[in-house]
Amino acid sequence: MNNSRIFLLIVSFIVFLLLQILVLKNLVLFGTAFCFLYVLYILLLPIEIKTVPTLIIAFVLGMGIDLFYDTLGVHTASILAVAFVRRRWIKMITPRGGYDDDLQPSVLNMGFGWFFTYSIPLILLHHIFFFYIDNLGTGLFLFVVQKIVASAIFVFIMSIIVQLLFYRRRRGI
Amino acid sequence: MQRILLFLYSIRALLLFIFLEAVAIWLIVSFNSQQGSVFFNSSNQLSGTILGYRSGVMDYFALTSVNRNLMEKNAELLAELQKFKNPPDSVFIPLDSALFGDIQFKGAKVINNSIRLSQNFITLNKGALQGLKEGMGVFNEEGVVGRVKGVSENFATVISLLHTDLLISSKIKSTEVFGSTKWDGLDSKKAKLLYIPRHVDIKVGDQVVTSGYNAVFPEGISIGTVLEVKQGTDTNYLDITIELTTDFTRISYVYLVDNYKVVELDSLYQTTGIKNEQ
């Protein structure tokens, strides 16, 4: 992990945060599909980052998002769950031959199939937390499930597009 | 002892996770009250400024509809004003100012709004320095918008009518039957009118307005029109759906109700033990 990588991580943190609060906050398809693209930032952290730093990054990111959504703590609670599970989940789905060091688990580096199994459960976990807390006390079960599924699909598609457009495949060694 | 420390060290990630999650849940629970603390939300200085920049850009796209609405409101007010002009053929006695209402209005601009969550908030570009206070009612030329949750120096957050915890005291305009309007979290154009007894005759298309029974809103601000009346599952009350007159997708300027007597009313309610409805 050299300085330029850390610099890139910080810059992309700010970009993801600003993108989420200034643009994507207003992007809701059909009233059900939300675009919580900031989950992708946690998903795309390099594999060797341990759980403790991931949790701290997720906490700061979640608080930043909550500040602008006026949902104090809701985004934080859900993104923390993703950050906690992420490393275990990565270990659980290790491909044959293991991971290279210092690798970004993006769709370009790992292939579509791996990224699908990696990201979908984590995105779903985040959305279940978020919409469950958001709708506590309303008793709208089906509507919540609809929101969770629609948003998860939307975020997954958006994350694939964003990676194809703005990320580079790691040069082979 | 060393073993315990080693054990704790080995589960440090879990401990940190539990700690941070507890902080988040504590924040959710303690800050979701109706009014109060505004440090950690969109009305603090930093986020307010950023949102202000964004709204500075986005406002241009809403100019047409804003202008049209303001013109309509102006025309309405001009018509109102005609009633107070002294007619040339009669004696005009100016009323004493004490007889005028206790209410003044303030204007503010919306810089942040959400409609899709189940608990939506609006941020305004004015705050305590401009005279905004907690608990003020908020409306625009179309109808009721919400109620101020908290203010910082230059910004304020408003609980939108599209918030599943907010109750607005309301009545049917034609029959003066009163109930409470509450959003059910489903559709940003519809809400429920609660606590209307079964024996009351309500027609589709009846207008619902604020009741003026408390100091938050003056009487007669439009809320919606009755869309559907059903005999619900509740044995005592009707299940009424109303269509909101306010279009929450394009709120840009709002008015706030400043009631001089709100403190007096509130303390009266408190001493007599009446729980005030929003």
Image: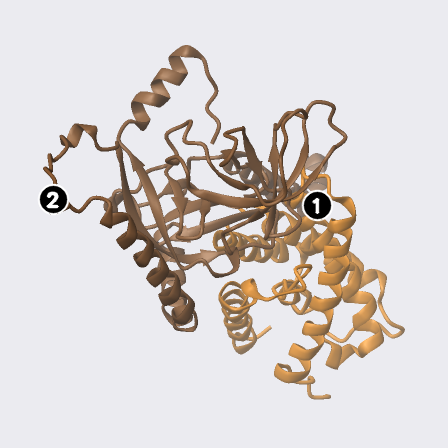
Chain colours: A orange, B brown
* x, y percent for residue A8: 54, 75
The reply to whether label 1 and label 2 mark residues of one chain is no
Closest to the observer: A83 or B136? B136
Closest to the observer: A2 or B68? B68
Q: Amino acid at mark 2?
A: Asp
Asked whether residue B126 appears in the rendered view, the answer is: no
Q: Is residue A2 left or right of residue B215?
A: right
Asked whether residue A36 appears in the rendered view, the answer is: yes
Q: Is residue B136 above or below residue A93?
A: above
Q: Marks 1 and 2: CB-CB under 8 Å?
A: no
Closest to the observer: A115 or B154? B154
Q: Amino acid at mark 1?
A: Tyr
Residue at figure coordinates x 42%, y 35% from the top left: B36
* x, y percent for residue B258: 30, 38
Residue at figure coordinates x 71%, y 68% from the top left: A154
Q: Quadrant of residue B46?
A: bottom left
Label drawn at residue B89: 2
* x, y percent for residue A14: 49, 68
Q: Is residue A126 left or right of residue B177?
A: right
Outermost residue, front side: B89
Whole-angstrom CA distance, mark 1 to mark 2, is 67 Å
**Could you tell me which chain the residue with mark 2 belongs to?**
B
Residue at figure coordinates x 74%, y 81% from the top left: A108
Q: Secondary structure at mark 2?
A: loop
Q: Residues within 10 Å of mark 2 (few under 14, many from 20)?
A: few
For disc 1, the marked residue is A132
Classify the position of the N terminus of chain B by image quarter: top right
Residue at figure coordinates x 48%, y 27% from the top left: B277
